[in-house]
Image (cartoon, rainbow, N blue to C red):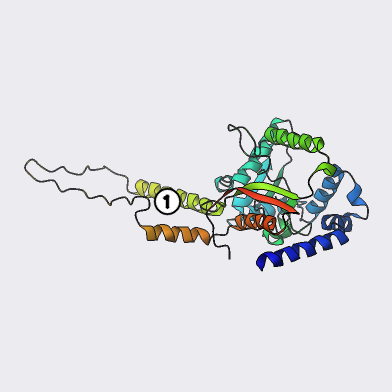
Amino acid sequence: MTWRLAAVLVAALAAAAAAAPWRPQSEFEALHGVGAAALDGATRVAAELDRSVQDFWQATTPHETREQLAKLLSPALRDRAVILWANKTFATRNFLLRPKNEGLAVALAAARRRGVALPDVAFSHVDDAAGGKSYCVAGPEIPTTVIAKRGGYADCGVLVPNPFFGRRFPKHKKMGDLDSWEAESAGVRAAAAARPLQQRTRRVFWRGKCLPGPERASDRVRKAAAAARRREARKQHRDANAGPRHKRPHASRGEEAKPRHKRPRASRGADPRRRLEQLLERCRENTAGGRARLLGASLTAARPDLFDAKCNELDPPRNFS
């Protein structure tokens, strides 16, 4: 019954899509005028970037600039902040702990090596691939860049490239390297030119990994920040109690030394119940990306004539309800 319902819904959506204009084109022309969607790609990108930037308040005086920077560097936003100043990029360590954020920094550094003079600008960056209006948490006062606008042009933020794509880079280079990105893009374009659209199979094709991972990036950032705070607290405690350090006296000759008992280290899998609890905790995580990929792959089972989406690698099944 479930697959039958899915097939009916997919068929209905396909029929509706055939009867209606493509939504992104309609939205773009509503914002930029009828016929704007027929312009070349570079012109369309430049026009939309200009419109997106205008959505944010722009400082015009030194006082307004100081207020804007103070809000951007507040505890709520500083780990999203990116400051370009004197052709250099500044961000917090917590910001760079997130791979896609680091990819943005790598891309900016690569642009600088190519001779691009970066403007002096400060902004908030959101690396979530879901997009949405709620990600501009600072409001129109703080310019915000995003890597996705899943809800369409109405989503907030200035759209910038997602460094996750074009990942076939050498091992010594990181995500966001522009040379690797350029080589990957050239390969894709060459493959597309070798097989015109009319000669391709009329199915949506996707291959990838359905691997949400053992923990979210936000969890890794929180753990790293907590570990840094513990190290700093231990350092302050040592500094506050600095003094002559006394060694623990050894047992005198003839006196039996008391054994020092260490807590036995639990071996992996020693407690099956604990391992089960950890697995269930992983299932309760916000793995929206993994759920979306599995739903996409399920379309192949419902309508193989329209979809060819499969997971090359798959994590153990999880409860996405």
* 59 to the left or right of 40: left
Q: Residues within 10 Å of mark 1 (few under 14, many from 20)?
A: few
The residue lying at 75 percent from left, 54 percent from top is: 305
In the image shown, does 66 or 298 lie closer to the viewer? 298
Residue 175 seen: yes
Q: Which residue is mark 1?
A: 230
Q: Quadrant of residue 27?
A: bottom right
- Judged from the image, the secondary structure of the residue bearing numbered disc 1 is helix
Report the number of numbered marks: 1
What residue is rendered at 81% in x and 38% in y?
A: 195
From the viewer's perspective, tell me whether residue 309 is left or right of residue 192: left
Q: Position of residue 201 (x, y in %)?
A: 78, 46
Quarter where residue 84 is shown: top right
Specify the farthest residue to the left.
254
In this picture, residue 134 sits left or right of residue 46:
left
The image quadrant where one finds the C terminus is bottom right
In the image shown, does 217 or 144 lie closer to the viewer? 217
Is residue 145 visible to the viewer in this orientation of the structure? no
> Which residue occupies 37% across, 53% down?
269
Quadrant for the N terminus, please.
Answer: bottom right
